[in-house]
Image: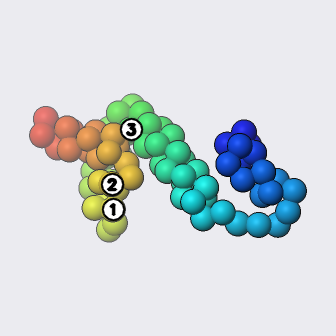
Amino acid sequence: MDLVAERDFAALVTDSFNETLARELLGVTDKVFDIAYAVVLTRFSKVINLVRQYEFIDEWKESLPNTIGVVIDSQMSA
């Protein structure tokens, strides 16, 4: 909320949309989930085989670099 208030206060008091702010918040969300996914895959490594079969895994390279790193590292050590 602080980010929204600082960048586009009108968004808090009116029904508006700020694409730049939305993209920035999505980027922050990607970083948080990247860490969460990497931790989960590290803890439950048997799931990695299923992750490798995921149809859109190539799209993760840009937004989930830590998660892809876990998948690649596990493949190399297998």
Residue under the point 21% across and 39% down? 74
Which residue carries the number 2 mark?
A: 62
Judging from the image, what secondary structure is the residue with disc 2 in? Answer: helix
User: For residue 3, which quarter of the picture?
Assistant: top right
Note whether 77 is above or below 24 in the view shown: above
- Name the secondary structure under disc 1: helix
Q: Earlier in the sequence, mark 1 or mark 3?
A: 3
Contact (CB < 8 A) between labels 2 and 1? yes
Residue 59, disc: 1
Instruction: Residue under label 3, please give it.
Output: 38
Q: Nearer the viewer, mark 2 or mark 1?
A: 2
Res 68 label:
none
Q: Secondary structure at mark 3?
A: helix
Q: Position of residue 27 (x, y in %)?
A: 49, 50
Nearer the observer, 64 or 54: 64
Question: Does 26 sit above or below residue 18?
Answer: above
Give the residue displayed 82% in from the left and 53% down from the top. 12
Choose between 59 and 51: the one closer to the eye: 59
